[in-house]
Image (cartoon, rainbow, N blue to C red):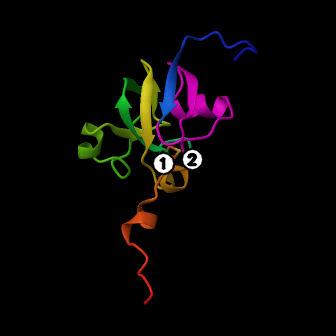
């Protein structure tokens, strides 16, 4: 790749972090993020083997760059938009959410535990 990457790109938006980055349609969602040194999608093997980069496509279209392991994405999940970010490339702008094993540290605004049970009053 030359110093000036002139490949056409589409925008990829990560719901949990608000991160947005340009990704070429010839590279995976994960590779595009890594090329720019961005964060947001958890990174593991970058080869479809670990499932760490599991995401759910909320909006937009992707194409497969390689097989997606059923050990990490079931057929039912695939029908719901789940895939591995290292195995698909965007063909349109994409809005996704992280669904992999490391998704919790990247979540924001989850105050459920702080509001779920009120502190008992002392008498
Ligand atoms: S990084 Fe391991 S499956 Fe994508």
Q: Residue at x 23, y 45 (%)?
A: 76
Residue 32 among magenta residues: yes
Element at label 2? loop
**Which residues lie in the magenta part?**
15-42
> Do tag 2 and tag 1 residues touch (Cβ < 8 Å)?
yes
Where residue 7 sits: x, y (%)?
A: 59, 11
Q: Residue tagged by mark 1? A: 49
Q: Mark 1 near ligand 1 (CB under 8 Å)?
A: yes
Residue 69 among magenta residues: no
Q: Mark 2 near ligand 1 (CB under 8 Å)?
A: yes
- The one nearer the camera, 65 or 78, is 78
Image height of 73 relative to 65, above or below: below
**Rendered image quadrant of residue 84:** top left
Quarter holding the N terminus is top right
Task: State the CA–CA distance, disc 2 to disc 1.
Answer: 6 Å
Q: Residue at x 64, y 35 (%)?
A: 38
Q: Seen in the image, is 42 located left or right of residue 59? A: right
Q: Residue at x 64, y 9 (%)?
A: 6
Q: Residue tagged by mark 2? A: 45
């Amino acid at each position: 790749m030359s110093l000036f990457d002139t490949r056409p790109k589409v925008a990829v938006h990560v719901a949990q972090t608000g991160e947005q980055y340009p990704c070429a349609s010839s590279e995976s969602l994960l590779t595009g993020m890594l090329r720019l040194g961005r964060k947001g999608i958890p990174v593991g093997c970058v080869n479809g083997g670990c499932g760490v980069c599991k995401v759910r496509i909320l909006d937009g279209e992707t194409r497969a760059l390689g097989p997606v392991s059923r050990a990490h994405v079931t057929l039912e999940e695939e029908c719901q938009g789940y895939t591995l970010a290292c195995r698909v490339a965007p063909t349109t702008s994409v809005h996704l959410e992280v669904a992999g094993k490391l998704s919790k540290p990247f979540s924001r605004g989850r105050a459920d535990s702080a509001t779920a049970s009120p502190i008992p009053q002392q008498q």
